Amino acid sequence: MKGFSVELKIAEISKYFLGIPYEKNTLLGSPTKEEELVINFEGVDCMTFIEYVEALRLSDDLSSFIENLKHVRYFDGIVDFKKRRHFFIDWQNLKSIRDVTEEITDRKCYIVMKNLNFIEGIEPKLKIINYIPAEAIEKIVSKLKTGDYCGFYTSKEGLDVIHVGIIIRDENNFRLRHASSIKGYVVDEDFFEYSRQKEGMIIFRPQEI
């Protein structure tokens, strides 16, 4: 999709996932089982959905897609359970992504330090997390763009977010495109309706590279 904007690439690529069934635990690997590189377009969870979209938008062919997926899903592109980006906040290290949470709130976002540690066999990691509180979302919504990756912050111990998806904007209409365990497949939902009961959100913006 050379010549297309980042926003259009993500909108068009993610559109092809609409209707694909939600399926959890599709990745293969554990602290005691060798990790395998899984590519499964027939069933996705919220995280594998955005991994595939981001890797696809960076790729020109199957070979480059495989390499890009390795780097999106794993630190240093090394297929290993301990190298997997288990948390949404781990996307901060991707060269193709920029954390714009502070920027779009004029540095008025909330800042917390959390110990992310819910995965057995993975060393806990202490992370500083910026997030936009729920009550401020409508105030900054005009700064959101199609293709923004949105993580819904949680104060639960050991976790950074409880769900992720992609912002799709049509003028002043905002949708969340995501793999929904409740709906059972990849869907578009009203962004405001979905975010209403959440604690806040983190916004990562894809970059041209």
Image (cartoon, helix red, strand yellow):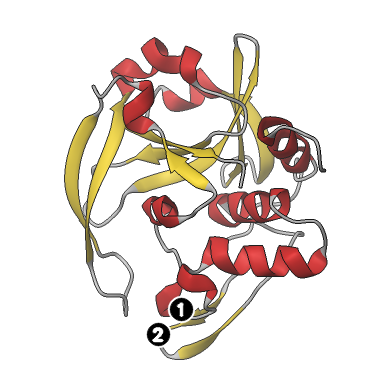
Residue 11 appears at what percent x and percent y? 72, 34
First in residue order: circle 1 vs circle 2: 2
Frontmost residue, 83 versus 153: 83
Q: Is residue 142 above or below residue 109?
A: above
Residue 38 appears at what percent x and percent y? 66, 73
* Circle 1: element type: helix
Q: Residue at x 42, y 63 (%)?
A: 86
The local crowd at label 2, few if under 14, some if 14 to 19, many if 20 or more residues have their Cα within 10 Å, is few
Residue 58 appears at what percent x and percent y? 69, 52
Q: Residue at x 68, y 43 (%)?
A: 186
Residue 71 appears at what percent x and percent y? 56, 65
**Disc number at residue 31?**
2
Q: Residue at x 75, y 59 (%)?
A: 41
Residue contact at pointers 1 and 2, CB within 8 angstroms:
yes
Frontmost residue, 138 versus 77: 77
Question: Is residue 84 visible in this depiction of the protein?
Answer: yes
* Circle 2: element type: loop
**Disc number at residue 72?**
none
Could you tell me how far apart the alpha carbons at marks 1 and 2 are, in whole angstroms? 6 Å
Q: Is residue 114 above or below residue 30?
A: above
In the picture, the quarter occupied by the N terminus is: top right
Residue type indicated by callout 1: Phe
Q: Residue at x 41, y 13 (%)?
A: 138
**Disc number at residue 81?**
1
For this view, does 73 lie left or right of residue 106?
right
Q: Residue furthest left?
A: 113
Frontmost residue, 18 versus 88: 88
Residue type indicated by callout 2: Pro
